[in-house]
Amino acid sequence: MRIAVGGIHTECSTYSPVLMSIEDFRILRGDELRAADYFSFLEGADVEHVPLLHARAVPGGPVSRPAYEAIKTEFLEGLRAALPIDGLYLAMHGAINVDGMDDAEGDWISAARAVVGSDCPIAASYDLHGNVSQRIIDQIDIFAAYRTAPHIDTRETMVRAWSILVEALRSGTRPGVAWAPVPLLLPGERTSTEDEPAASLYQVLPELDKRAGVLDVNLMVGYVWADEPRATACAVVTGTDKKAASKAVEEIAASYWNARENFRFGSVTGTLNAMLDIAEASTTKPIVLADSGDNPTGGGVGDRADVLKARLARGWQDALIAGITDRPAVEACFDDGEGGTLTLRIGGSLDPSSPAVEVEVKVLHLDDPGPLAERQAVVEASGIVVVLSARRRPYHNIEDFHRLGLDPKAARLLVVKSGYLSPELAPIANPNLMALTEGVINQDIENLASKRRQRPIFPFDRDFDFTPKARLSARWR
């Protein structure tokens, strides 16, 4: 069996003015893809793997049209060259927005279908924060999505999609996909699978997989910071029996809809000033404060200095802020060198509307892995340690800090640009606070500009009724 592998994976806030370029993507090609740990699950003695191209980027603003078209064109050229193939596996995210285009995944998967033809099964794996459309469903035969947020089942999900595809080819059975949109859009911070009611909703999914005629069931939260027609929650089921799949998809959709009023933030949450008041009164450490509106892993720009500005105004000592994206500031630190003292303007390097501060700093540490875009600088400003990065990136893993000679457990206050905390930071938080800060993914979703979403949709609208109805893929009708 010849199975081709590829895809594109990122998440885009339509509220961000900062377009992604091709330089923002890490692109794995050919043997490099096959050798990557991300795809190390690919196996099967009777499978000939055909690695094509996989592009992945830290979430951000919309992808520029030229960047998207260049990546897609290269992928399709590789796909054509790989023919004939028996199956295609696409590792996707589901929440890409391309400047001037709706439903980028629909465009990508439709283009792939046009190349491989109608007889070739296509399997796709998704982030549960992806947005699905009928166009996407109509092109695929197998669908599997994450069941955890924070995401700790990425590999497991990819294995689910891959395994169903391999088994379908071995057995000659052709699965199909049913789905049911749910007019409901909530942020991941209110729908973490570690908190109720999401925890219970997702716990039942593996049991539904065991039903006759059902192979894989999924609840998609969707991506709320995309003001586009397809943005919605949904249930998606891969199966071998249309009635069984349709029944399961309607049950999942109904369970999510019926719980809509019960979703809450899992951590202590409030305005920035309210959270700083709590932090100042706390006697434990490390207090971990999430700057939620500028979280790059959710599509935030990552260059806002709101929290630094507030901390300086309060005269706070013993705080670590990681990090703020500011390439000019990083370059200035490298010019001055470790131990140097200089006046920096920090913040607003990508989005001119982002708050910035001008402050005298001492350069504590410089990290230069090679490429200019990978450089980092650690500076101290009035008793506050700040990590500056040349490119947009999160600081969600303990190793991110250790690489810079920092101990995240040692600071009294650790500030990270995040929503719900990562699996590595959550256990050390004492306590865990989330500030409802400004930014292109701010949590005040009821007041987000909503010009292109299909209406009505909860919580933008509340006074309407809904009954889920299963829809089948065009390939399964």
Image: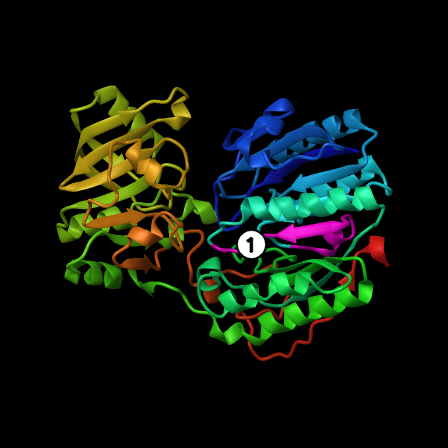
- Label 1: state its secondary structure: loop
Q: Is residue 470 visible?
A: no
Q: Is residue 336 above or below residue 99?
A: above
Considering depth in this image, is 468 or 40 the residue closer to the camera? 40
Residue 263 point in image, percent of width and height: 47, 70
Q: Residue 146 in magenta?
A: yes
Q: Is residue 139 visible?
A: yes
Residue 414 point in image, percent of width and height: 25, 48
Mark 1: few, some, or many residues within 10 Å (few <14, many ≥20)?
Answer: many
Give the position of the C terminus as an image quadrant.
bottom right
Q: Residue 177 in magenta?
A: no
How many discs appear?
1
Q: Quadrant of residue 49?
A: top right
Residue 227 point in image, percent of width and height: 57, 56
The residue under the point 63% across, 35% down is: 68
Q: What amino acid type is highlighted by mark number 1?
A: His
Q: Quadrant of residue 368?
A: top left
In the picture of the structure, the residue carrying the numbered disc 1 is 129
Q: Is residue 430 above or below residue 44?
A: below
Considering depth in this image, is 224 or 190 the residue closer to the camera? 190
The type of colouring in the image is: rainbow
Q: Is 251 placed left or right of 366 in the picture?
A: right
Q: Which residues are magenta?
A: 132-149
Considering depth in this image, is 117 or 84 the residue closer to the camera? 84
Q: Quadrant of residue 341?
A: top left
The residue under the point 72% across, 28% down is: 50
Considering depth in this image, is 8 or 174 the residue closer to the camera? 174
Residue 106 point in image, percent of width and height: 71, 47
The residue under the point 69% across, 62% down is: 210
Q: Is 464 placed left or right of 393 in the picture?
A: right
Give the position of the N terminus as an image quadrant.
top right
